[in-house]
Amino acid sequence: MRVKIFGDGCIHVITNLSSILEGIKLDSIEVSAGGSAANVALQLKKLNKDVDFFGVVGKDPLGDIFCNELKENHIHTDFIVREGKTHKVLIGLNTPSEAKVVISPGIEDIKLIKKYINHVEDGDIVYIPGFKEYEDILVDISRKNCTVFTDYGHLSLGLEAESTYLDGLIKISEYSDVVLASGFAFTKNICDEIAVSLSGSRCKLVIITFAGDGIAVITPKYQTYYKTNKLPVMNNVGAGDSFMAAVIYGYIQKWEIDEIIEFAHKVAEYKISHFNNFATMKNIMNRR
């Protein structure tokens, strides 16, 4: 089964801040494809799942780098619109603290992806970011007879207050089957309110990650909290995307939720403990 992924692309420039202070080392700087959708696609490919990427990226040299990396990972780029200017993200690693991130926005028209919605067929699994720019596309895709996974991360809708972020999560749940949310804006006791909101909605599963401080799983019928150990961080950027990719993988494999969460946590754990690597199945087996 191929996973159909919608999203825009960007370029990550990753460096170790300590290397800058000590003097630049050529092996401490890396340029790679990035963005929520691309990270999910690349992680799924590392887990040996086929994906179709429907996206937009700048018509510039950075866009070329983005497309070439996807091609190198055997992800078709036939459905990528090349227009505008590619987003750039500078990621400064400062172990054991979280990475410092500076975003230089490009010019990419998300609406150009809408023409690919007709590629979504009955029974498909679809991933789409939960950013406000994708709202119209998410609504249209939700009308298809497919399973929709949405990442409602900490940048979604540009909202930070708990009440406003919760409103956005509830809105996205109307159009998604599975939602991954960031616990940065939530206290753990908000789970009851989310569970009530899921009653009667399309969404049957909300997963909230608390940045190494546990994972909450919420359905209309029950809530479960998984305690996790907080590990030293090398690069936390994209960890949530790796987690989501692993959740999709587990769903395709028809695993029980406990097994999915355990696997997804290990995949994300691997991501944060490396400079810029996505976990393979072999990597995960070696961590058991």
Image (spheres, rainbow, N blue to C red):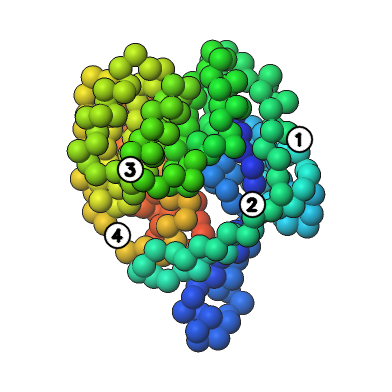
Give the structural element (helix, strand or loop) at label 4. loop
Give the structural element (helix, strand or loop) at label 1. loop
Task: Identify the residue shown where x is 77% and y is 48%.
Answer: 84
98 to the left or right of 68:
left
The residue wearing badge 2 is 10
Mark 3 or 1, which is nearer the eye?
Answer: 3
Task: Identify the residue shown where x is 22% and y is 29%.
Answer: 192
Cα distance in 3D space between marks 2 and 3: 28 Å
Give the structural element (helix, strand or loop) at label 2. strand
Cα distance in 3D space between marks 4 and 1: 39 Å
Mark 4 or 3, which is nearer the eye?
Answer: 3
- Is residue 45 at all visible to an observer of this figure? no
- Is residue 217 at all visible to an observer of this figure? yes
Cα distance in 3D space between marks 4 and 3: 26 Å
The residue wearing badge 4 is 231
Give the crowd class for mark 1: few <14, some 14-19, many >=20 residues within 10 Å. few
* Type of the residue with mark 2: Cys
Residue 78 is labelled as: 1
Work out whether 268 lies above or below 2: below
The residue wearing badge 3 is 162
Cα distance in 3D space between marks 3 and 1: 40 Å
Mark 2 or 1, which is nearer the eye?
Answer: 2
* Type of the residue with mark 1: Asp
Question: Counting residues from the N terminus, which is met first, the one under dot 2 or under dot 1?
Answer: 2
Cα distance in 3D space between marks 2 and 1: 17 Å
Work out whether 19 lies above or below 54: below
Question: Counting residues from the N terminus, which is met first, the one under dot 4 or under dot 2?
Answer: 2
Cα distance in 3D space between marks 4 and 2: 27 Å
